[in-house]
């Protein structure tokens, strides 16, 4: 029997699962709908090898599910599990926090530009603000 991995906090454990350059972006791209490997490679600009490694780790962690199709040609789709959807909800707020902090630091630039927001092609940025507004309205109603 191996000793359990020890973490100081739940946040440290969560970050060990989603840490890295591509995993948060993969979660964003999978939010709301499944994607094929080729779609993810095209959108990320990462190699198939890097993407495969990241996806395998997310599948092993139970954050992403993988479904193979026996078609010609065969293909694979990835989607968020219910745990992945819960994690994505937490990432939306973390994204908001990061945007707010970056806005006060002239040496930091978030790649989610105003133009992307105008096009509605920024995912976390728009979703975060819409959800936070909705959550704020719900809190006000409860008072």
Image: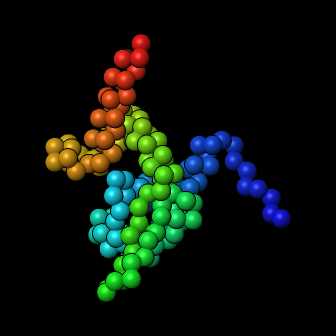
| Residue at the image position 45 percent from the left and 49 percent from the top | 85
Residue 33, percent from left and from top: 33, 58
Does 108 sit above or below residue 80?
Answer: above
| Residue 135 vs residue 43, the one in the foreground | 135
Does 75 sit above or below residue 125?
Answer: below
| Residue 76 vs residue 100, the one in the foreground | 76
| Residue 92 vs residue 66, the one in the foreground | 66
| Residue at the image position 32 percent from the left and 74 percent from the top | 38
- Quarter occupied by residue 26: bottom left
| Residue 2 vs residue 70, the one in the foreground | 70
Q: Quadrant of the C terminus?
A: top left
| Residue at the image position 37 percent from the left and 28 percent from the top | 135
Q: Is residue 112 left or right of residue 59?
A: left
Q: Is residue 8 left or right of residue 86?
A: right
Answer yes or no: is residue 113 visible: yes
Residue 103, percent from left and from top: 32, 34
Q: Quadrant of the N terminus?
A: bottom right
């Amino acid at each position: 029997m191996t000793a359990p991995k020890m973490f100081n906090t739940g946040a440290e454990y969560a970050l060990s699962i989603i840490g890295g350059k591509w995993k948060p972006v993969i979660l964003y791209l999978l939010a709301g709908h499944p994607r094929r490997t080729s779609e993810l490679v095209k959108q990320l600009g990462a190699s198939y090898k890097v993407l495969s490694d990241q996806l395998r780790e997310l599948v092993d962690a139970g954050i992403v599910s993988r479904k193979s199709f026996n078609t010609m040609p065969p293909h694979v789709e990835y989607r968020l599990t219910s745990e992945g959807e819960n994690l994505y909800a937490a990432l939306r707020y973390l994204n908001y926090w990061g945007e707010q902090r970056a806005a006060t630091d002239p040496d930091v630039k978030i790649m989610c530009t105003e133009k992307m927001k105008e096009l509605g092609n920024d995912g976390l940025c728009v979703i975060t603000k819409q959800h936070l507004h909705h959550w704020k309205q719900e809190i006000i109603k409860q008072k």
